[in-house]
């Protein structure tokens, strides 16, 4: 065993990359859930984004265009969910699961001719000098553009929800759609926009996998990342900055356990492999346990209208 | 007992309808059952290439059918049965987990031939098994890896701790060690055959800890991409050539080439000469191919690797030749002794020098 | 403008009509998709919906298989529906299914090669306990630590999958399997084998259990106090609390029941159709069952029908891909469409469509 071989700097740098797809999908889903909609179709939207982005990037040679189309493609797919749940008032849990099923099928159909192709590469952003700073350099200044954009997106979502009128309306719609409606807000329009945003973010997450992280197209390549994103939103108790924490925690433990294995750590591999899931649960239990004398509000932090259909009866 | 007879009668009736249908056509119907999607770019993809080769070889005389994404277990038994019912004359089941279902269905359809990949059970005279000696290719990889590494650390991304994977690790290690006594293997068990993101993470972890050669026994190209990103790290294609990453980081590859075997067996069915047998082929008959060794490998190393391949191919050299000891120091093979297939098939131990435990 | 008006009570007529409308709509949309893929749409639709039931060549085999495929879905969905009605979200049935199979199989394998009638019942009990215990983890954490059960039950699926891999490579591995992964096959161990009860019908103990579960759930919800409490908690949580419902007990009951039923489904599957514990033993029944539960409107009889319908599309889809060479991906997309339409038309049951001017939110 040689634990000294594990470099904390590189570990943090690679966990940032590892967590990016989950983080993108999770921050999108957070906005959706804040609007009172539970979309379990994240996995389906991610993989659709992965193939849309990949196909466009290969055809045009431009990863940027790929990412844009991934967002658009997944957003269009999410509109199936939007129309069904908002206009046809279908059950959100079941519709989301159906969306995952449909997205997995659709993406494989679209991707049939893209197997075994290498996409155009996305360059890391080069910060001259800065990336050479010991420790800090590799962590902060040595990534591709999407990593930074994702962090900016998390901050933007946080600020929007907290400080802007749009954020206020979104939260109002999620907390009490009848009251929001009475105040004259277009509940359904707000929710549709949130769902489309969630779809776009999931699509970007998928494209990050197929264009940068892996990068290749293979059927089923998201391999459950969408589910983890869903879990991260719950873990974060619907707070944007905790989504960041959750995604980095999960990504971090995943990367760490592989590093420990590579270093020959004498812990049975099965336990190491389970550890990201177990540690996530453990941290949530600690965070949500009632404190002495005080009430824990964690489990009550869900938007009050989450998963409930809205129909304007008046 | 009554129950069993009933099943037998029903099955016989089904078998009759099945064959009657098949005889109505002059074509030989060939079925394939795949565990993954044909677009996985690895294991299933190569089997499907074999299927296409069968179509090409026999043209109008064959009809091929396949079913992809078939889970192992109950679903597999149903899919194989339906394939037999649809009039298939020979069915290739291409995953280890199809072993029991294949044999169960074979018992009900004595007139249909069954070929199960990577298993060992042949409970009926109409079942054959076939597998490839991938470890022969691993030996060649190990040789190149041992010569090429500068850090003397070789990273190995393993899938599940099963004999085939362990065999590969041992074969690679023995031959890396032979040319570079200081070599050290770091093994990561991914517990998956296919999860690109996880494979990328595993490769990155190994590289960050100093490995400059990555061997993989998982199917995606993610480790190749991770190595490319890292720079001076070399890799080997797995299952398919992964040639899009040549000449660096991919310096060579092991390719599963099922086509010759599939064509041979389908031909045997057509000629009526098919019989149950166990095939375990390696480099010699072309079931295991070594992908082109790229120019990133120095000419002398390449020549040695090709010589090793040739000696395995003509049978003058066995990959597991003594003296070899097991990890715990106990004797395994005496000087000049070669491993028997039984031990190899069920290999569940590391050879001396490898560190760490095989997960149980 | 098109406008929806809430019906005072669900329309009886549309309850029965909506599934038919949905299936027809799916046939049209799916037909278009198959046509785009260059396949004969009529033949494809016929193969999916008709052939598993009535095709001369296959039906004798595939009809009973419908029961085999539907049984675990129904068994799990019934358990889930109880919790879903009360607003308790167990989405980790897949993990409970795995643990049930492991517990049950472990008991069976411990007795090998003894033959006795008692072995199979013991396995059944162990299977139920395995699922129950696994579901109790999110249950207890929810009750005592207020941890969200969605997250815990979902993440425990992945943990269960690693335990499954570890078991099939280690403890439960067949000692005569030449080092290969996977347990002994229960099909060759009579006392532990969940065989067909009547040959050629597909009826095994799991199917029987599924039917019993349907009846049990029906009676519970219609007649029993606990069923009333479950419905009340789902519809009016505050009223339920004032009405003396103990939320902790209800959470444990709902999670426990769904876990036990999922565990049973796993046990019946491992000892019967599947035959052995292997690395890839689970095939997603736990997730599909969530869809089945909602397609069946969380009603026991609805779940029964929804389970059979899902099974039909699986088996029909297999036949379509086998006979017509339709890619598995297209079948998956087709199933997705069917679900979309089934969910969409449900609106007609509860709402009336009217045309005219009115503001729409």
Image: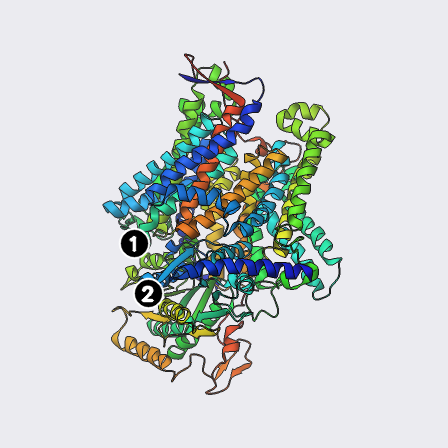
Q: Position of residue B94 (x, y in %)?
A: 45, 62
Q: Position of residue A313 (x, y in %)?
A: 51, 16
- The residue lying toward the viewer, choosing from B315 and B201, is B315
Q: Which residue is mark 1?
A: A118
Does residue B320 appear in the picture of this structure? yes
Whether B118 is drawn above or below A96: the answer is below
The residue that appears at 47% across and 30% down in the rendered structure is C21
- The residue lying toward the viewer, choosing from A145 and B143, is B143
**Closer to us: mark 1 or mark 2?**
2
Q: Position of residue C301 (x, y in %)?
A: 62, 35
The residue that appears at 73% across and 30% down in the rendered structure is C223
| Lateral position of residue A13 relative to residue B293, left or right | right
The residue that appears at 40% across and 52% down in the rendered structure is A14
Q: Secondary structure at mark 1?
A: loop
Q: Secondary structure at mark 2?
A: helix
Same-subunit check for callouts 1 and 2 = no
Q: Which residue is mark 2?
A: B58
Distance Cα–Cα, label 1 vs label 2: 33 Å
Chain of the residue where label 2 is placed in the rendered structure: B
Q: Specify how the rendered protein is coloured.
A: rainbow
């Amino acid at each position: 065993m040689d634990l000294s071989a594990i470099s904390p700097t590189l570990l943090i740098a690679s966990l940032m990359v590892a967590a990016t797809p989950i983080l993108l999908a999770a921050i999108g889903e957070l906005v959706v859930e804040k609007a009172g909609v539970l979309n379990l179709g994240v996995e389906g939207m991610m993989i659709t984004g992965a193939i849309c982005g990949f196909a466009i990037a290969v055809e045009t040679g431009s990863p940027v265009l790929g990412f844009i189309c991934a967002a658009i493609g997944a957003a269009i797919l999410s509109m199936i969910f939007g129309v069904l749940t908002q206009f046809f008032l279908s059950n959100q849990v079941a519709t989301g699961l159906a969306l995952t099923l449909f997205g997995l099928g659709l993406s494989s159909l679209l991707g049939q001719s893209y197997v075994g192709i290498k996409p155009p590469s996305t360059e890391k952003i080069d910060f001259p000098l800065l990336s050479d700073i010991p420790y800090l350099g590799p962590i902060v200044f040595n990534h591709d553009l999407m990593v930074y954009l994702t962090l900016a997106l998390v901050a933007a979502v946080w600020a929007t929800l907290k400080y802007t009128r749009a954020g206020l309306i979104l939260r109002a719609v999620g907390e009490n759609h009848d009251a929001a409606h009475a105040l004259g807000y277009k509940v359904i329009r707000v929710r549709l926009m949130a769902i489309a945003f969630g779809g776009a973010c999931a699509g970007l997450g998928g494209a990050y996998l197929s264009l940068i992280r892996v990068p290749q197209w293979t059927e089923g390549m998201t391999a459950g990342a969408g589910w983890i994103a869903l879990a991260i939103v719950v873990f974060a108790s619907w707070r944007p900055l905790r989504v960041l924490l959750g995604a980095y925690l999960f990504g971090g433990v995943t990367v760490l356990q592989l590093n420990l294995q590579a270093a020959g750590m004498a812990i049975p591999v099965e336990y190491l492999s389970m550890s990201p899931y177990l540690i996530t649960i453990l941290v949530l239990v600690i965070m949500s346990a009632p404190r002495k004398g005080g009430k824990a509000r964690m489990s009550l932090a869900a938007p009050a209208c989450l998963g409930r259909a809205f129909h304007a009866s008046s | 007992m009554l129950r069993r007879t009933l099943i037998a009668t029903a099955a016989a009736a089904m078998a009759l309808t099945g064959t009657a249908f098949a005889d109505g056509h002059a074509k030989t119907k060939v079925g394939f059952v795949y565990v993954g999607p044909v677009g996985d770019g690895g294991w299933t993809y190569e089997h499907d290439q074999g299927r296409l080769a069968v179509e090409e070889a026999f043209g109008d005389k064959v009809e091929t059918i396949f079913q992809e994404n078939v889970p192992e277990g109950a679903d597999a038994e149903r899919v194989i049965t339906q394939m037999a019912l649809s009039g298939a004359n020979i069915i290739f089941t291409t995953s280890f987990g199809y072993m029991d279902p294949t044999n169960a269905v074979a018992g009900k359809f004595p007139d249909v031939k069954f070929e199960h990949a990577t298993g060992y059970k042949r409970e009926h005279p109409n079942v054959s098994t076939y597998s490839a000696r991938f470890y022969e290719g691993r030996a060649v990889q190990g040789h190149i890896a041992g010569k090429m590494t500068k850090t003397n650390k070789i990273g190995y991304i393993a899938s599940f701790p099963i004999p085939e994977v362990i065999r590969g690790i041992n074969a690679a290690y023995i031959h890396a060690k032979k040319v570079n006594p200081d070599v050290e293997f770091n093994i990561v068990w991914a517990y998956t055959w296919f999860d690109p993101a996880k494979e990328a993470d595993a490769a990155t972890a190994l590289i960050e800890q100093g490995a400059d050669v990555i061997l993989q026994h998982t199917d995606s190209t993610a480790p190749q991409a991770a190595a490319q990103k890292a720079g001076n790290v070399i890799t080997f294609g797995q299952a398919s050539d992964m040639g899009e990453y040549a000449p660096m980081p991919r310096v060579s590859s092991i390719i599963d080439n099922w086509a010759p075997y599939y064509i041979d067996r389908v031909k045997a069915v057509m000629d009526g000469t098919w019989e149950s047998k166990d095939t375990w082929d390696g480099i010699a008959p072309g079931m295991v191919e070594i992908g082109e060794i790229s120019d990133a490998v120095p000419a002398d190393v390449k020549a040695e690797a090709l010589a090793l391949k040739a000696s395995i191919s003509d049978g003058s050299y066995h990959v597991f030749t003594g003296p070899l000891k097991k990890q715990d120091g106990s004797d395994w093979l005496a000087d000049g002794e070669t491993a028997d297939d039984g031990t190899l098939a069920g290999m569940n131990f590391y050879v001396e020098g490898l560190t760490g435990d095989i997960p149980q | 403008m098109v406008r929806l008006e809430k019906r005072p009570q669900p329309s009886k007529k549309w309850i029965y009509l909506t599934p038919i409308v949905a299936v027809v709509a799916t046939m049209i949309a799916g037909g278009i998709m198959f046509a785009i893929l260059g396949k004969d749409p009529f033949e494809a639709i016929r193969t999916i919906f008709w052939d598993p039931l009535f095709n001369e060549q296959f039906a004798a085999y595939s009809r009973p298989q419908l029961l085999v495929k539907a049984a675990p879905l129904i068994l799990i969905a019934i358990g889930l529906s109880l919790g879903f009605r009360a607003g308790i979200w167990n989405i980790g049935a897949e993990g409970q299914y795995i643990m049930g199979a492991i517990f049950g199989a472990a008991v069976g394998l411990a007795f090998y090669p003894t033959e006795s009638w008692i072995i199979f019942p013991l396995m059944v009990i162990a299977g139920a306990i395995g699922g129950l215990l696994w579901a109790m983890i999110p249950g207890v954490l929810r009750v005592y630590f207020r941890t969200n059960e969605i997250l815990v039950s979902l993440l425990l699926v992945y943990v269960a999958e690693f335990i499954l891999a570890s078991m099939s490579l280690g403890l439960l591995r067949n000692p005569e399997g030449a080092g290969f992964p996977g347990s002994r096959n229960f099909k060759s161990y009579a006392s532990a084998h969940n065989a067909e009860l009547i040959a050629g019908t597909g009826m095994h103990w799991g199917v029987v259990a599924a039917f019993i579960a349907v009846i049990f759930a029906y009676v519970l919800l219609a007649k029993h106090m606990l069923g009333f409490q479950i419905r009340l908690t789902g519809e009016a949580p505050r009223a339920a609390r004032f009405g003396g419902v103990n939320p902790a007990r209800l959470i444990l009951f709902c999670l426990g029941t769904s876990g036990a039923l999922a565990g049973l489904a796993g046990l019946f599957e491992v000892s019967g159709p599947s035959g052995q514990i292997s690395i890839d033993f689970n095939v997603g029944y736990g997730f599909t069952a969530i869809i089945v539960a909602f397609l069946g409107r969380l009603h026991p009889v609805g779940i029964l029908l929804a389970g059979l319908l899902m099974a039909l599309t699986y088996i029909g889809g297999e036949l379509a891909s086998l006979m017509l060479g339709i890619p598995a991906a297209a079948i998956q997309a087709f199933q997705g469409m069917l679900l979309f339409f089934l969910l969409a038309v449900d609106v007609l049951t509860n709402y009336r469509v009217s045309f005219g001017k009115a503001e729409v939110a």
